Image (cartoon, rainbow, N blue to C red):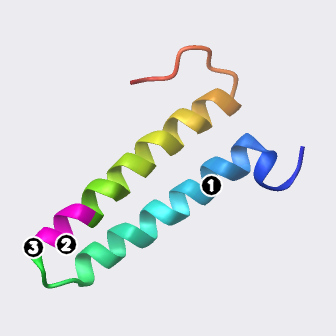
């Protein structure tokens, strides 16, 4: 497997996106936008953790 098909690569890309969203949330002055971006960042990071666990062979990833 290579590229986006690789679960570890997908998890890494998801973590990078989550980091970008978290940084954008810190830069915005609009409280609603900050919360929206932070929530989206957390959601993607949680999914990234699940993807990472699955790529490591963990049959039962944390919820």
Q: Nearer the viewer, mark 1 or mark 2?
A: 2
Image marks 1 and 2: residues in contact by CB distance under 8 Å: no
Identify the residue at image location x=9%, y=73%: 31
Q: Position of residue 59 (x, y in %)?
A: 61, 14
Q: Residues within 10 Å of mark 1 (few under 14, many from 20)?
A: some
Q: Which mark is residue 32?
A: none
Q: Which mark is residue 31?
A: 3
> In terms of secondary structure, what is the magenta stretch mainly?
helix
Question: Quick one: SS at disc 1?
Answer: helix
Q: In this image, 42 relative to 59: left or right? A: left
Residue beneath disc 2? 33
Q: CA distance from mark 3 to mark 2?
A: 6 Å
Q: In this image, 47 relative to 2: left or right? A: left
Identify the residue at image location x=61%, y=48%: 11
Quadrant that contains the N terminus: top right
Image marks 3 and 2: residues in contact by CB distance under 8 Å: yes
Location of residue 46 (image quadrant): top left
Q: Residues within 10 Å of mark 3 (few under 14, many from 20)?
A: few
Q: Which mark is residue 12?
A: 1
């Amino acid at each position: 497997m290579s590229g986006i098909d690789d679960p570890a690569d997908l998890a890494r890309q998801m973590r990078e996106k989550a980091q970008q969203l978290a940084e954008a949330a810190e830069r915005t002055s609009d409280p609603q936008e900050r919360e929206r971006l932070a929530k989206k960042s957390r959601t993607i990071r949680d999914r990234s953790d699940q993807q990472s666990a699955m790529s490591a062979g963990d049959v039962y990833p944390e919820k």
